Image (cartoon, rainbow, N blue to C red):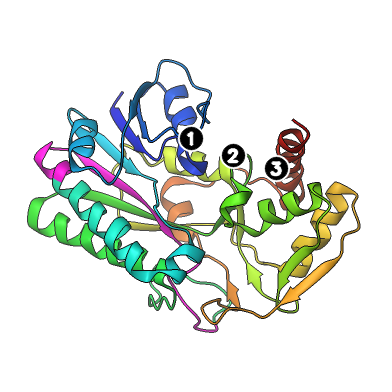
Amino acid sequence: MAKILVIGANGFIGSHLVDDLSATGHQVTAFDRFSAQNTAYIATGVRKITGDFLSRGDIETAVAGQDFVMHFLSTTSPATAESDPSLDVRTNVAQTVELLEACVDARVKHFYFASTGGAIYGSQGKLEYSEADRTQPISPYGIGKLTIENYLRYFRATHGLASTAFRISNPYGPRQRPNHKQGLIPIVLRQIALGEHVVRFGDGSMVRDYIYVEDVARMICSVVGRDAASDVYNLGSGRGHSITEVLDSLARITGVRFAIDERAVPPTFVDRVVLDATRFAQEFGLPALTSLDEGIRLTWEEIRENIDG
């Protein structure tokens, strides 16, 4: 089994990775600020490092002795990156380059990166997108992710650092923090739990590919340590759901009839993004994916419990 560092281990996807990697017997080190009182992951026997991603010294300490590094931390969200594009460049992009340098110095064998499948392809009018399609991001968040993907190629060519980027569609599920204003499903569930109006951008026709977070974690863990034919993989359900369909599911699961406040669609939003995950499926196989209704039900249980608590 490998020694694996998860950066962003107390975050949404990172905490699920810690649990799954630990369950398969890997020696996991969890790196995060751990600003929350409790750890989000439930695995025991995990080495915990409290540190700042923006500190070169903290990063170097964390990567020392690791076989694999999984970079699942972001200092910005799509909204904060758009409000201050230079912040994304100064923190996410620049600091990831420093992380890659530290990995080279520490002789890390493989670097895994959480990219975006929702924003990286941009608006091309296609029914679905494969890894062979052009990348045309129009948002600072997507531009930053693509820039990091290109730096992965640079470090592979110049330093031999093997790497894999996962272009994840729209993950949702337990441990997602709705107050961070990222992710339609947790945000709306929180609005429902608080009795607030639900905010909808546009007329509800925008289509996204939603995938349950535990399915994402299982897919990623199935790749770790295995030879891969490609350096980038789409991770999505392959099914598109309009915002109207998602809101209908939310109403059905919660049993709440809610009012909707319609807002103008931001100019960086794309109308339709559905991912073709054939490359991943053919190489590694796909787990049985959680249905949208079931995933929403599990997410609603956690949000309602936290609101009540």
- Residue at image coords 42%, 35%: 9
Residue topped by disc 1: 15
In the picture provided, is 292 more to the left or to the right than 3? Answer: right
Image point (38%, 75%), residue name? 135
Real-space CA distance between mark 1 and mark 3, rounded to the nearest whole angstrom: 15 Å
Q: Position of residue 277 (x, y in %)?
A: 50, 59
Report the amino acid beneath label 3: Thr
Magenta-colored span: 102-125
Front residue of this view, candidates 28 and 9: 9
Q: Eyeballing the image, is 252 above or below 270?
A: above
Instruction: Say which residue label 3 marks.
Output: 299
Label 1: which secondary element: helix
Estimate the x, y position of residue 257 in percent, counting from the top left: 91, 58
Q: Position of residue 113 (x, y in %)?
A: 34, 50
Vertical placement of residue 184 versus 273, above or below: above
Secondary structure beneath label 2: loop
Instruction: Give the quarter of the figure containing the N terminus.
Output: top left
Whether residue 230 can be seen here: no
Q: In terms of image quadrants, where is residue 34?
A: top left
In the image, residue 309 sits, relative to residue 146, either above or below, namely above
| Residue 27 appears left or right of 116 | left
The answer to whether mark 2 and mark 1 are in CB contact below 8 A is: yes
What separation in Å lies between label 3 and label 2 (alpha carbons)? 8 Å
Of helix, strand and loop, which one carries label 3? helix
Mark 2 lies on residue: 175
Sequence order check: which comes first, mark 3 or mark 2? Answer: 2
The amino acid at mark 1 is: Ser
Is 237 within the magenta? no
Q: Is residue 307 visible?
A: yes
The amino acid sitting under disc 2 is: Arg
**Residue at the image position 48 percent from the left and 60 percent from the top:** 278
Q: Earlier in the sequence, mark 2 or mark 1?
A: 1
